[in-house]
Image (tube, helix red, strand yellow):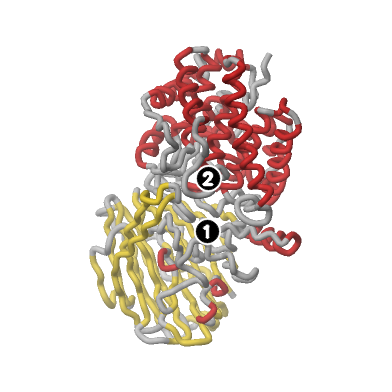
Amino acid sequence: MHNYIFIDQDLDELRKDIYGSKKRFYKRLDDQCRLYSMKQLPIEHPSESTTYFGLAIANLSLAFLLTRQKHYYEEAMRWIRCVINYEHWGNAHLVDVDLSAAWILFGLSLGYDWLKDEWNEEERVRIEQKIMLQARRMYQFKIETEGHGWSTNYWQNHNWINLTGLAAAGYSLSYLGEEPQDWTECAKKNFAIVFDSLADDGSDYEGVVYWRYGAMWLFVYAHLLKERENIDYFKKSSFLKNTFYYRLYQAAPNLEEQINFGDCHDRRSGHSTAIYYKVASEYKNGYAQYLGNLVVDKFLYREAMESGIKPGILPECFFELLFYNPDVAPKNFTDLPLVKYFSDMGLVVIRSSWDMDALHFSFKCGAPGGKKQWEKLWELKKNKNYDCFGLSHQHPDNNSFILHANGVFMAIDDGYNRTVKASDHNMILVDGEGFEDENQNNIFKNYLPHMIGNIEKFIESEDYVYIIGETSATYKKKFRMKQCKRHIFYSKQGYIIISDQITSEAEHDYSWIMHGDTYPEAVKQNYNNFTYQIQYKNGTGCMDVYQLASKPVMLKQSENIVRAVMTTQEPDKFRETKMKTISLSTKEKSKTVEFVNVLVPFPVNCRPKIEFIAINTKQFLGVHIKSERHENLFLISNGKIEKYYDQAIQAQTALLEYEQGNLKKVVKLKE
């Protein structure tokens, strides 16, 4: 019996399963194949991305292999004959040697293996020769560009996708001799470095949308290699085991939208049923099975409709069918922690619950690409003189945050940008600017090893989460920054205190900025000793922001429009984000300033019965929090707080907890 590539289960049993335990996935496959039959295929290569050809061929070919229904075969051949008639694969940029070519190479190679017994000799040779030609082009480019570009950008989706396509071609034509084996060996050597270098905690700096677009291929390649050569990265790679949790914790509370650090073209292109079901099957992970089912049952077509990413989520159906394991029981997330720290990326995620309208706060401060990658990049530069700093999807977002609560976003990120800069994130600006070399696609290619952000402290207790992020080394050198510390205090009572300590050797204007989908509904001055109280409304959610600074400040509002082309293959296709921005800016230049901002999200018409009173002395700033259930003081200083009234403090940051008006405890958050 034919040992079909990529199919790691008994084919006769699989043919039974599509009418039993995998019936709904066969229905998904059939629905997708019918969509293909309605598409008019261009005779000439279109001026667009053609990644969709690859999965179309794979879906149609698998449908025929499983059912032997002739209409699937005829449609598969329509797509195959069309694409092999194109002289080149791809448009405008890196033609034949990048994503469009790789997706097609992968799908056509599987289709070749699954259908070749149906062809006459002439048809088989014609398709074989086209696969051979395209694989040679890809392989030669990989060898010729070692040390720069996608060939050695081991942490980038282009590397993963292109080498998976090449590997599939090699396995499909392995009977032809040494040349195809060179391709599979090339991929094996590449992915040995990739899997050794990925973040062990599963985080991915490219962002959730590129995670679903690119990291999917890490699972696809690992599956292909395991099926072909019994080399099992699912057992070896901590990234493969843990990356589902990165994705889960970067899901908004409604689970349909995502938190869009990195490059995310929209808020709904973040799910990969292929990954979810593969994780579920390999690791008996019921959480992944649950999310996969949720996406298939509820989110699938809305994501497909709103996403502009080709080929999109619908064509993953053949992966779903092959990867789904009905023996894994789905499990919801209610027993998972509400706080998760991804130390490699410097990402902290805080949830108030697993309810659909919960508070979700994400904070980020770390090395470009993540700590492990950043260190490996410099090793490769030192030992091999490789320039692998392909960080075009990494944003200058150290010390930035995103907030989703009560069903809506309250503090947003630019999401997708090709000229990245700090002003598009929720952070501190110096003289209106931010990071070194910003306002271009890859700002980190000329950075030095020390030019990173760092989470200096992370504490989670029963009552609060406390984080300190430091990122002065990433700001423009001309600013001569000495300190840019952001303190995050999340009370599990539902409010967030963000305190910034800024110090430079020179005098500057400083701005605290935050972006939202809406402008504030109201602004009050000198409210409870705060400089400003800002009130937001956005659909089902509201938020109060209480603002305080150590120097005189003024509040400004503006619209920030970020517009970026999605792919060089389609230069007229772009994504646009309109951000409503508030800026709390110093009135005079100075060497140092401190900001304190309190964020209090709540449902519409349900403002919490809690009072915030600002504390502003020459030695420290603070917030007095009073409610029916608790009373706290949060105090912060750029030096050391010796005491508060008669109470000794002896700390830079402290939390004073009261019970019925009496001091219960002094917590030294930072001594």
Number of the label disc, if any, that sits on residue 394: 1
Residue at (53%, 22%) from the top-left corner? Answer: 61
Residue 406 image point, x, y percent? 34, 50
- Separation (CA) of disc 1 from disc 2: 25 Å
The kind of secondary structure element at disc 1 is loop
Dot 1 surroundings within 10 Å: few (below 14), some, or many (20 or more)?
many
Residue 642 image point, x, y percent? 54, 83
Q: Is residue 290 visible?
A: no
Residue at (41%, 68%) from the top-left corner? Answer: 423
**From the viewer's perspective, is residue 669 above or below residue 507?**
above
Asked whether 419 or 423 is in front, the reply is: 419
> Label 1 sits on what residue type?
Gln
Residue 313 image point, x, y percent? 45, 36
What count of labels does the image hold? 2
**From the viewer's perspective, is residue 123 above or below residue 489?**
above
Q: Name the quarter where the N terminus is drawn.
A: top right
Q: Which of pointers 1 and 2 lies earlier in the amino acid sequence?
A: 2
Q: Is residue 309 visible?
A: yes
Instruction: Determine whether label 1 and label 2 are within 8 Å by CB.
Output: no
